[in-house]
Amino acid sequence: MTTYAHCQSFTSTSIRSAIGLGAFAPLLLVVAGTASADPPNGTYDVETPQGQIGEWTITSCGPGCAHIHFDGGGKKQDPEMATGAIITDTKVFNGQGSFTANPSSLCPDGTSLTQAQSYTVNLATMTGTVAVIPLRCAAHRGSDDPPFTRSFTLTKT
């Protein structure tokens, strides 16, 4: 019986190459997907379990960049959060962005103070968190609530 060593070698090499490419192909798709992903343009309701914290208009400002305009919104508001800040360009890397806001609100005596808010957002899952240092209204017939964190979701309007 005659054997052909070059055929066996070619077949073994082809099988190993196919297995290697099969294992590597999903990685290529992940890299291609994250590298070319642009922010999802549109208007979104931003809501916590306690109520709406605003309405965002998201527009792309180039690869890996999203411009987020933050406005009040018209639904039941989250009672512990000040709203109405405008956010400037936010860098987005692999769908993740973070930024701060300092919206103003009124204490019971009418004094305007700012609330410190620090956001993280995942534009792939349209979810995020906001850490809040509330208004310091104790000197203005209000209270000084402790800092808190809220999760939120973005829903396209």
Image: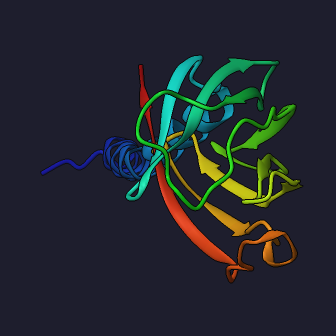
**Residue 136 in the figure: left or right of residue 53:** right
Work out whether residue 99 can be spotted.
Answer: no
Q: Which residue occupies the foreground of this view, 73 or 66?
A: 73
- Taking 79 as reference, is 73 above or below it? above
- Taking 61 as reference, is 45 above or below it? below
- Taking 78 as reference, is 91 above or below it? above
Q: Which residue occupies the foreground of this view, 117 or 33?
A: 117
Q: Which quarter of the figure is the C terminus placed in?
A: top left
Q: Residue furthest left?
A: 1
- Residue 41, how many percent across, how many down? 59, 17
**Residue 7 in the figure: left or right of residue 133:** left
Q: What residue appears at the point 70 percent right and 55 percent down from the top-left corner? A: 119
Asked which quadrant contains residue 146, the reply is bottom right
In this rendering, the count of numbered labels is: 0
Work out whether residue 5 can be spotted.
Answer: yes
- Residue 29, how many percent across, how many down? 49, 36
Q: Which residue occupies the foreground of this view, 19 or 14?
A: 19
Asked which quadrant contains residue 39, the reply is top right
- Residue 27, how many percent across, how many down? 51, 47
Q: What residue appears at the point 87 percent right and 76 percent down from the top-left corner? A: 139
Q: What residue appears at the point 68 percent right and 79 percent down from the top-left corner? A: 145
- Residue 40, how many percent across, how many down? 56, 23
